[in-house]
Image (cartoon, grey):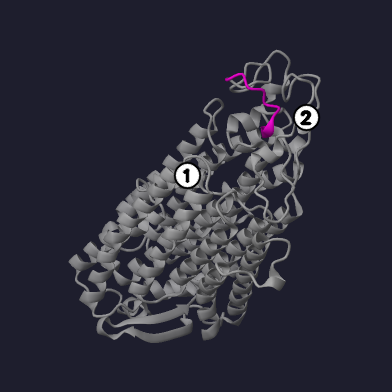
């Protein structure tokens, strides 16, 4: 078990180094790009298998106990140790990270985004995986900071070199926000370590803040909390997220939403709740207030983007939805109760599965239409996805209703438990204030349902006005052309590319005249039959099915996840007592 956890953390880093080396002659396949992409699938697959074996060997009767631990002295002068371990809180995040990275590598094998080189792409994804896994596995504050920062550089280059429009400004905004927050966080971590005499997270959690004065705890919560809040992202420190998601390639958006955002909320649970309970109690109402503002703000932003004529980008809308969903996670943490924290951890996993699937699907829609503009997608044809690519439309509708918290799917339980936690917060917190936060958060669920159903109606069903004679869809003049007079029968409606390993699948591949709608009056015009798009491909089905299946499984059988997290959360909140 010790070897497995160390292998899970180190193997992607070694794989990244190997990806930069020339491929052996017998393993090149049809091209060097195919060889390195296959290498990425192999390494991430091996890490996923090791993580699943680690989960199978985990003692599920003692999920509150740190298992598979490694504890080696690294910097004796500062008492910094290479301390690894996992419990019921971190194990689900390790499995989620390994799964999403493997699915991204598999997807990229067939649909490599346009960029400089396959070698650099695979190496960056593997370094990103190593840093994320290390964040969830290390038990030393200094190592946590190093792992936390390790993911910045690969994500920056994935956005800046393999991204879409306005990728450079988005990448710089991502790095600057997170770096500035991390500088403040480092000061807080050093303050805790020097004042308590140890950087060991297990020892600090067991001490439960008894070795730190209330003023030190308050300062530590402010400093560490800022860095964690930026990564979460918490309103109003969220503005880097929509730009980063909009510009990032599909797999970059999946990893950013699926695992990187979880690093911030994990830090709140693993470090601040047990190490500085007095400081957290002081700031819990403010954290909850920011959380519910983020829930409502994210939902209203999505509604604004979804309305006809707004020219909203579907990827940007899903990014703003993440601000709202992560607001529920922060609200659960702010309650400082087992119910609320368990809800936050469940919502973390549910968001990773559902939003990861959503970004995969939105990327596929953009590949087929050449755009993620909602007005174009809804006005392209009256039939929209249900009529042109029914399986893709069905999957998008499924992910949307899962995201809005439909009972029976994973998104429901996290939101419900966080609201229950706000109904009865921890002793010392103002119940009237948290009842108000609960009511505001509950209204956010209604707003979420509103914008998600609008998205399903517009993207999957289309704008019904576009199919009626004498009317025009949003942003059109009734002639099948957009507001600029450009006929929409070009690349936006062509089929997806060939899907061969290493192909970029650029919109130019989909713009052949023979693939355009016929009739000459534009998509959805009277008397024309919409040309079907390429529906779900085999490699897409392989990458998306596990996420859809786990979304259903977690919704129908939440005890699997709650049985892991609850004992560990109980121990964490009680000062190390099981």
**Sequence order check: which comes first, mark 2 or mark 1?**
1
Q: Position of residue 446 (x, y in %)?
A: 52, 41
Residue at the (56%, 79%) spot, across then down: 60
Q: Position of residue 482 (x, y in %)?
A: 61, 22
According to the picture, the residue beneath numbered tag 1 turns out to be 167
Name the residue nearer the viewer: 349 or 255.
Answer: 255
- Check disc 2: other Cα within 10 Å, few if <14, some if 14-19, many if 20+: many
Name the residue nearer the viewer: 20 or 82.
Answer: 20
Q: Is residue 36 left or right of residue 498?
A: left
In this picture, is 241 found above or below 148? above
- Magenta highlight on residue 491: yes
In this picture, is 248 found above or below 487? below
Name the residue nearer the viewer: 536 or 152.
Answer: 152
Where is the C terminus found, in terms of image quarters? bottom left
Segment colored magenta: 484-492
Where is the N terminus found, in terms of image quarters? bottom right
Q: Position of residue 134 (x, y in %)?
A: 46, 71
The answer, for residue 441, to whether it is visible in the render is: no
- Residue 539, by quadrant, is bottom right
What is the number of callouts on the image? 2
- Residue 535, by quadrant, is top right
Q: CA distance from mark 2 to mark 1?
A: 33 Å
Which secondary structure lies at badge 1?
A: helix
According to the picture, the residue beneath numbered tag 2 turns out to be 530
């Amino acid at each position: 078990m010790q070897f497995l956890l160390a292998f899970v953390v180190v193997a992607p880093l070694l794989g990244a180094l190997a990806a930069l080396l020339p491929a052996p002659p017998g393993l090149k396949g049809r091209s060097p790009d195919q060889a390195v992409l296959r290498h990425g699938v192999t390494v991430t697959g091996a890490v996923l298998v090791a993580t699943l074996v680690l989960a199978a060997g985990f003692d599920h009767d003692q999920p509150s106990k740190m298992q598979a631990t490694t504890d080696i002295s690294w910097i004796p002068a500062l008492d910094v140790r290479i301390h690894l371990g996992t419990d019921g809180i971190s194990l689900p995040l390790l499995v989620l990270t390994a799964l999403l990275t493997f699915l991204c590598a598999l997807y990229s094998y067939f649909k490599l985004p346009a960029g400089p080189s396959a070698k650099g792409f695979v190496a960056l994804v593997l370094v990103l995986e190593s840093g994320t896994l290390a964040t969830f596995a290390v038990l030393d504050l200094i190592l946590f900071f190093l792992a936390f920062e390790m993911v910045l550089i690969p994500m920056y280059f994935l956005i800046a070199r393999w991204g879409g429009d306005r990728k450079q400004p988005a990448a710089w905004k991502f790095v600057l926000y997170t770096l500035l927050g991390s500088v403040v966080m480092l000061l807080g971590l050093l303050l805790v370590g020097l004042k308590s005499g140890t950087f060991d997270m297990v020892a600090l959690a067991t001490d439960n803040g008894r070795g730190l004065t209330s003023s030190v705890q308050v300062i530590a919560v402010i400093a560490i909390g800022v860095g964690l809040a930026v990564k979460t992202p918490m309103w109003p420190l969220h503005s880097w997220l929509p730009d980063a998601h909009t510009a990032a390639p599909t797999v970059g958006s999946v990893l950013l939403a699926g695992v990187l955002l979880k690093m911030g909320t994990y830090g709140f649970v693993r470090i601040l709740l047990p190490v500085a309970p007095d400081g957290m109690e002081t700031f819990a109402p403010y954290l909850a207030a920011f959380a519910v503002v983020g829930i409502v703000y994210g939902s209203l932003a999505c509604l604004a983007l979804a309305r006809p004529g707004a020219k909203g980008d579907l990827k940007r809308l899903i990014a703003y939805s993440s601000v709202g969903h992560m607001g529920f996670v922060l609200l659960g943490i702010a309650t400082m109760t087992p119910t609320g924290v368990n809800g936050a951890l469940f919502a973390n996993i549910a968001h990773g599965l559902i939003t990861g699937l959503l970004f995969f699907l939105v990327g596929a829609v953009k590949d087929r239409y050449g755009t993620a503009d909602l007005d174009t997608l809804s006005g392209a044809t009256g039939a929209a996805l249900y009529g042109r690519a029914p399986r893709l439309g069905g999957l998008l509708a499924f992910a949307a209703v899962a995201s809005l918290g439909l009972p029976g799917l994973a998104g429901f339980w996290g939101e419900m438990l966080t609201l229950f936690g706000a109904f009865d917060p921890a002793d010392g917190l103002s119940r009237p204030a948290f009842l108000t936060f609960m009511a505001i958060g509950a209204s956010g669920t209604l707003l979420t349902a509103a914008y998600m159903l609008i998205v399903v109606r517009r993207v999957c069903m289309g704008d019904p006005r576009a199919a009626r004679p004498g009317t025009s869809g949003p942003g059109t003049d009734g002639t099948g052309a957009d507001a600029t007079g450009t006929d929409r029968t070009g690349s936006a409606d062509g089929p997806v590319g060939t899907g061969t390993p290493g192909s970029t699948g650029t919109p130019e591949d989909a713009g052949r005249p023979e693939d355009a709608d016929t009739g000459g009056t534009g998509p959805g015009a009277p008397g024309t039959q919409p040309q079907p798009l390429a529906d779900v491909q085999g490699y897409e089905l392989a990458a998306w099915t596990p996420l859809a299946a786990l979304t259903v499984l977690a919704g129908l059988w939440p005890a699997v996840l709650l049985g892991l997290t609850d004992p560990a959360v109980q121990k964490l909140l009680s000062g190390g007592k099981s």
